[in-house]
Image (cartoon, rainbow, N blue to C red):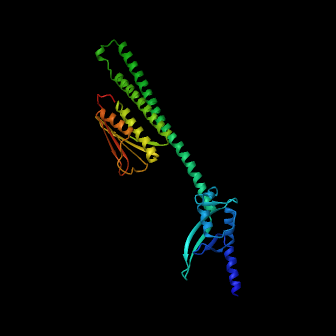
């Protein structure tokens, strides 16, 4: 009866879908089922006899070709994960238990997830390009609308002036307001065009290094724009290089006298105080040369604040 029970237990042990084996405190194999024998032979080309052989399999670089993410791949397409654990029996004997679990489905899902992440990264890159193009299209539409308004206003001004001249009225009575409005619109059109070029160039540079710039506010229409663009570019490059950032946030505020830019990103937080390298040192020199200030914070996140006077006579 005992023999029958022992054989039944051994048969059930051998028929387990997972591989399992036990080694005594001296590393000698004491019990191993068929699945573990089969897996070990398939991976090493020899029979399992000792714990040292198992540990060599799990740590030897010679198995690297069949091991990915700590998972052993077999020629039949299955994936197996090995785990070691020390156990103590009720009579205080110590054994090392090794279990090989079939993780084929989990491994397959992980690979699918990796492919999905790659596809998502490509989609994100296309979206950044679309975002940059959208900004340019919006600016172009604004300029087109402005040109239409200028065209209409100048047309009305010409008609009004012609009618005035045909009536032989004194020039002092000529209303120049429509012409002043048209000139004002023309100046605004030029400013929009310059801002469009600056923003488009910035977005293009960001796209080329894999980061998205989120602008909150508008760039000033004077010489300070060049310095602010330089500050954004420097932060953009550093955010990608040192923090692995994907997005750069630029908040543009100020008043009639000063333009202020606060620049942050979603990258890794600096470990400590930020030492100004060549790029930031040069930027700080340009900002201070035109009467501005630059402040750098590293906690709770990187933040660069630039303040530029709008009516500085100094060449930027």
In terms of image quadrants, where is residue 296?
top left
* Quadrant where the image shows the C terminus: top left
Q: Is 67 or 106 nearer to us in this picture?
A: 67
| Residue 236 pos. (x, y %) | 43, 41
Tell which residue pokes out farthest to the bottom in this image: 1
In terms of image quadrants, where is residue 48?
bottom right
Tell which residue pokes out farthest to the front in this image: 26
In terms of image quadrants, where is residue 145?
top left
Q: What residue is drawn where x is 30% and y is 32%?
A: 289
Compared with 53, 64 (above or below) is above
Counting the numbered discs, the total is 0
* Quadrant where the image shows the N terminus: bottom right
Q: What residue is drawn where x is 61% and y is 56%?
A: 64
| Residue 229 pos. (x, y %) | 39, 35
| Residue 43 pos. (x, y %) | 67, 62
Horizontal side of 315 relative to 135 (left or right) equals: left
Compared with 53, 113 (above or below) is above
| Residue 222 pos. (x, y %) | 35, 30
Horizontal side of 234 relative to 96 (left or right) equals: left
């Amino acid at each position: 009866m005992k023999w029958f029970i022992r054989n039944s237990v051994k048969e059930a042990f051998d028929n387990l879908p997972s591989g399992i084996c036990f080694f005594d405190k001296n590393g000698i194999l004491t019990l191993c089922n068929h699945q573990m024998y089969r897996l070990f032979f398939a991976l090493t080309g020899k029979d399992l006899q000792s714990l040292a052989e198992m540990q060599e399999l799990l740590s030897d670089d010679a198995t690297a070709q069949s091991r990915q993410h700590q998972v052993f791949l077999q020629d039949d397409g299955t994936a197996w994960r090995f785990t070691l654990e020390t156990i103590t029996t009720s009579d205080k004997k110590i054994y090392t238990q090794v279990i090989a679990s079939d993780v084929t489905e989990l491994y397959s899902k992980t690979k699918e997830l990796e492919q999905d992440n790659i596809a998502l990264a490509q989609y994100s890159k296309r979206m950044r390009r679309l975002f940059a193009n959208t900004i340019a299209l919006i600016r172009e539409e604004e300029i087109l609308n402005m040109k239409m308004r200028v065209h209409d206003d100048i047309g009305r001004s010409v008609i009004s002036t012609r009618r005035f001249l045909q009536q032989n009225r004194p020039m002092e009575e000529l209303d120049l307001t429509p012409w002043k409005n048209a000139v004002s619109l023309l100046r605004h059109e030029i400013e929009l065009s310059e801002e469009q070029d600056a923003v488009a160039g910035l977005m293009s540079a960001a796209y080329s290094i894999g980061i998205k710039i989120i602008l909150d506010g508008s760039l000033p229409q004077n010489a300070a724009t060049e310095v602010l663009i330089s500050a954004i570019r420097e932060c953009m490059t550093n955010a990608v290089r040192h923090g692995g950032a994907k997005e750069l946030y630029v908040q543009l505020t100020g008043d009639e006298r000063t333009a202020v830019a606060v620049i942050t990103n979603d990258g890794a937080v600096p470990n400590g105080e930020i030492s100004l390298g060549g790029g930031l040192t040069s930027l700080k020199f340009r900002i201070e040369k035109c009467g501005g200030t630059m402040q750098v914070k590293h906690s709770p996140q990187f933040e660069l604040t630039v303040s530029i006077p709008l009516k500085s006579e100094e060449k930027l």
